[in-house]
Image: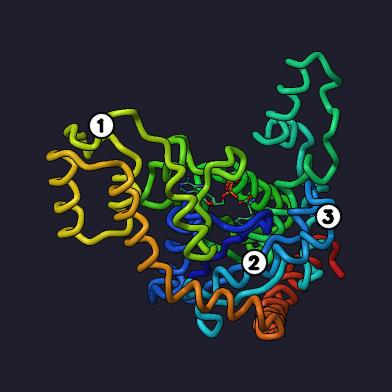
Amino acid sequence: MKTVLTGVKPTGIPHIGNYLGAIKPAIEMSNDDNYDRALYFIADYHALTSVRDSKKFHEDVYNVAATWLALGLDPKRAIFFKQSDVKEVFELSWMLSCMTPKGDMNRAHSYKDCVAKNTDAGKDPDQGVNVGLFSYPILMAADILLYDTNFVPVGKDQIQHVEIARSIAGRCNEYYGKDTLVEPMEVIGKESSYIPGLDGRKMSKSYDNTILIFSTEKKLKKTINKITTDSSAPEDPKDPNNCQIMTLYRLFANKEQVSALEKRYREGIGWGHAKAELFEVINDHLKEAREKFFYYMENKHLIDEILEDGANRARQIAQKTMQRVRSNITNF
Ligand code: ADP
Ligand code: TRP
């Protein structure tokens, strides 16, 4: 049995970087017959380390769910659910935290980065750090290990977290027998380079340079028009290999469209026209999905039904794992 699993934090509306770097490859894996079982979940309680606005929290859970469904996740093939609907994860999380050296958490990147920032600013090293943020990797290990996961598709920033999950599983297996937990592996997408944002840096919520997957046509056009360009004149020849409009264009256009636009770059094209071409291909690619997205957002009960069904199926797997783990760890 080969199980693939990944989680998505519902913080903010997903952007094109998330789509190409994470959502699209994960959906492809869920349709790949090399895997027997795919579980995708919304890591809603992981978001509690930073989200304080419960209305936004609620809306973002739906935003993420509607995004994945609109982009083609088939909830019959993949088990699609909300992390917090399967309470077993919190029991496993506690057990795992009792097997994890505190030093491993001290060395986890996101906590270490907070400490480094505070120290540089002359503040208390732990200022603004809650215990949830500190032990975040343990809940993530529980997410993964609860479903006997073999493969975890993630971005580069999450590799350390999967390594931590693997090491916790290995330690439990040493203590309690090698059948206690399955040791997972990360899967990193072919797309090793980052999708650039409006300013040419990695597209990211934290840089405020994103193109949202689903907004109205008008907003999409307006956002694309904000892409930073140089001050060359329209008739000046331009290098198609050194331009983020072109980088994004290549991700959505077919071969013929790409060579046609490259030719226009070399001959001289106004940035406004290049942006209009980019808008056309992105809009074409997302038009149908956008309609589905807004349909789901207006009919949230459909999302509730899908997530509830997913949670029921996920819980069955979780309960089986927990019977085994409880029996190995406590002998009950
Ligand atoms: P953000 O940087 O906007 O906060 P997240 O960290 O929430 O994005 O990313 C969620 C997933 O989307 C990660 O798995 C990450 O690999 C992927 N991702 C985010 N931004 C990009 C990007 N610019 N290019 C490729 N993949 C990305
Ligand atoms: N930490 C991941 C992120 O920030 C989200 C996540 C939570 C996750 N649990 C997971 C990813 C389990 C993979 C497996 O993107």
Q: Earlier in the sequence, mark 2 or mark 3?
A: 3
* In front: label 1 or label 2: 1
Q: Residues within 10 Å of mark 1 (few under 14, many from 20)?
A: few
Secondary structure state at the residue bearing disc 1: loop
The residue under label 2 is: 63
Task: State the residue at coordinates (56%, 68%).
Answer: 67
For the question of whether residue 316 can be seen, the reply is no
Quadrant position of the C terminus in the picture: bottom right
Residue 304 falls left or right of residue 199: right
The residue under label 3 is: 53
When the figure is inspected, residue 200 is found, relative to residue 73, above or below; the finding is above
The disc labelled 2 sits on which kind of residue? Answer: Asn
- In the rendered image, residue 298, in percent from the top left (x then y), is placed at 66, 80
The disc labelled 3 sits on which kind of residue? Answer: Asp
- In the rendered image, residue 46, in percent from the top left (x then y), is placed at 74, 54
Task: State the residue at coordinates (74%, 61%).
Answer: 44
Disc 1 and disc 2 in contact, CB within 8 angstroms: no
The disc labelled 1 sits on which kind of residue? Answer: Ala
Task: State the residue at coordinates (84%, 60%).
Answer: 54
Secondary structure state at the residue bearing disc 2: helix
Q: From mark 1 to mark 3, how far is it between C-alphas? A: 46 Å
Residue 252 sits in quarter: bottom left
Q: From mark 2 to mark 3, how far is it between C-alphas? A: 15 Å
* In front: label 1 or label 3: 1
- Closest to the observer, 330 or 94: 94
Residue 136 falls left or right of residue 127: left
The residue under label 1 is: 233
For the question of whether residue 235 can be seen, the reply is yes
- Closest to the observer, 74 or 218: 218
